[in-house]
Image: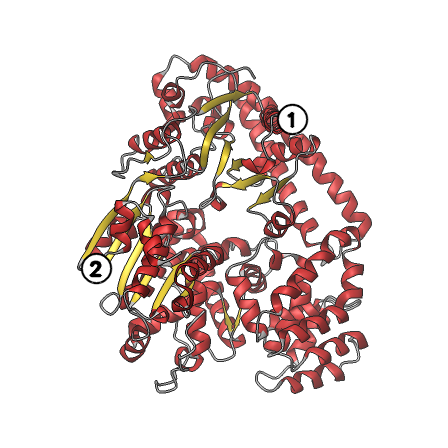
Amino acid sequence: MSIENMIGNLNENQRAAATFSGAHALVLAGAGTGKTRTIIARAGYLIHSGVPADRIQVLTFTRRSAKEIIERVRVGLGDRAEGLNASTFHTWCMTLIRRMPKLFGCVGHTVIDREDQIHLFKLLRGSEKTNQIPQAAMLCDIYSYARNTRSSLTKTLELHYDEQLLVKEKIADVIRAYEAKKRGRHYLDYDDILDVVATVLKQDTATRDYISQQYEHLLVDEMQDTNPLQWDLLEPLCDRVKLFCVGDDAQSIYGFRGADFRNVHSFTQRVQDSVVLRLEQNYRSTQEILDLSNWLLTKSPVDYNKHLVAVRGNGHKPKLLDFQSEWEEGRWIADDIARRRDEGADWAQHMILTRSAFAARAVETTLLARDIPYVFIGGTKLLESAHIRDLLSLLRIAANPLDELAWMRFLTLWPKVGDVTANRVIEQFPTTGEVSAFVSVINRDDKLPAECKLAFTKVAGMADNPGAAYIAAKQALWPILEHSYTKDWDRRRGDFDLVEKLVKRHTSILAFIEEYLLDPISTSDVKRAENEDVVTVITIHSAKGTEKPVCYIINVSPGSFPSSYAIENTDEVEEERRVLYVAMTRAQDELILTRRAYGGNGYSLRASEQNPAFMDNPEYVELKNQIKLLAIALAKDTVMLAEYPHNAITPENAGLLEARIKEVQNEIEGKRIQMQAIANLLIKAQTDNPQAQASTHYFLSDLTAELAISEVPAGMSSFWTDGSNLAARDRPNVGIDLS
């Protein structure tokens, strides 16, 4: 493909965007309008026009998108595209830090992921039963949200965790201790990676000039998903490089992570000499599917000013089906997919979109019962798996002996080595020094098994030879990992070979760990590679960029759309609209929406709880409280089982725990059915009340009328230096405003 073909294959609006000659541009690209094709053409056009490829940086949100952009530009331009940079925000910032560690004050730092963060918060908050401080996972969420939105601790708590305001000062103390621990152990969490670079760019003119001299153009994909922290990365460079940002405000669905679609709406006010270009010709879906999607946006108080038109023309009208339960819903979907398969369709032509893994449990069960092959996307990431983290703990301490979290995990793998022994060993380590000093401490300790000492000794000193280090670590830890994961070892053991292939691509352990922590590879990606002809079950938040001929969106009912957690907040309800919009626009030929009828009115229990009549009913309230207590017990048991075998539970007790979890789940389901029976009676008594109808249906209130459906039977450039001509600095003070 030549540049002529690359540009010539675009429509008029795409071509205008790709060949834009002004300073800064925001391209509002509706779903299926060829956003990626336009970015690729833009990069190709710039290179063809004389801009050196290595002076163009493309910023994306996934490694997959970055890789696709580079590969397709290379197909079009060949060697001229050599040096084009495309990466995620985190990878780009980490590359800058690794290229110039002294400049950013991050020499020898290790990246930690969310699980590591939670472990640190757990240690720092204490474990007393009377402790009023939020659990570690919530502390992690509070901290990350505040950083990504540039909000104070008080504002964050007021917005999302108001029940924690009474213990704000205690939360602040834990956060201070967390930030001090990170500094002392040379850790960088995900938010540090962006914040360190953004802070230095803002504060230091020399660094800002130096980095901006490396680029002429920044191309930003999925602009609607950027948050205030990511904007702080771009803003210092606006008067030095040209921004070309592509996004769709109607697909901004990551507000819970701090994403702010106003980065799109306010673009021309924030960036001088900028223009807005629009792409509205849709190449994915038929017009009937787009009519429903367009209608959903027209019901919004937000002016999206968007109307997609199908290049493909007309097709099937979307369907809306009512079911009495999730199990009936699941059985119908499995039957429908099996019928289509019998008629000649591939399994891979079907996609089931769900709000969460939990919400898809009935669908997954029925697919398994019908022997329909499927892959779930949105689940466990490969390097988040316990057995892989166990092995990587040894690599991490070889690369950074100060990594206390990795030491704790590695040492407690061994028999008769618990937290007390591990902590005692760690306290003997020097705060600085060569790896050999840590080897000496390990070898002197009589409580540690010889195999433990040998394992670390073998890998120590291999920080810059990750392939050899991984093989040595796998050989050393294989027997103990096999013993720890006896129950499902056959399933887990294959993951080690995959990781070995990945690690051999890198020249240092830290580089390998950083790449796959910053943009994890999913176990589902592996399964999909092994068997392409499978049905896709996917969470909507994982579905952007995907498309299938036949799409099922399950449980499009109030309480699920919008989520019951969002109904008191106008902005969150609006984001729920965009979530449904994203789901609808994945369908190419057929779109099927299902909902729980619950007496034919489309109500769900969560939405029903907003009605005072339900909360005035003592039987309903009692059942609700019983379910809440059962859910708390279920959550504790589930966490305990998930941590096995890294806790005191025996294999026998683990089996009993698993059985108890199933019993509690069944008991909750039984009480939920009782609640639904009461709810149906109360709903029936209110069907003539328009105000009650409006309070529960929200933006789905006239979906049935809209569809007119009757009742349905049940890498950076090589010329870069390390910035040694610029002044070295201490790591900048980054964190949150604890006021």
Front position in the image: 162 or 570: 570
Residue 295 pos. (x, y %): 32, 29
Q: Indicate how the structure is coloured in the image.
A: secondary structure
Q: Is any atom of residue 407 visible in this view?
A: no
Look at the numbered disc 2 and give the secondary structure of its residue.
loop
Q: Which mark is residue 670?
A: 1
Q: Is residue 555 above or below residue 385?
A: above
Q: Is residue 421 above or below residue 134?
A: below
Residue 332 pos. (x, y %): 59, 24
Q: Residue furthest left?
A: 273
Residue 226 sits in quarter: bottom left
Front position in the image: 76 or 114: 76
Image-based side of 296 in relation to 126, left or right:
left
Look at the numbered disc 1 and give the secondary structure of its residue.
helix
Q: Is any atom of residue 663 visible in this view?
A: yes
Amino acid, disc 2: Ser
How many neighbours does mark 1 have within 10 angstroms: few (below 14), some (14-19), or many (20 or more)?
few
Image-based side of 553 in relation to 643, left or right:
left
Labels 2, 1: front one: 2
How many neighbours does mark 2 have within 10 angstroms: few (below 14), some (14-19), or many (20 or more)?
few
Q: CA distance from mark 2 to mark 1?
A: 64 Å
Residue identified by numbered label 2: 21
Residue 286 pos. (x, y %): 39, 31
Q: Is residue 119 above or below residue 688?
A: below
Q: Quadrant of the C terminus?
A: bottom left
Amino acid, disc 1: Gly
Residue 75 sits in quarter: bottom left
Q: Which mark is first along the chain, 1 or 2? A: 2
Front position in the image: 727 or 296: 296
Residue 428 pos. (x, y %): 66, 81
Query: Residue at horizontal 70%, vertical 33%?
Result: 371
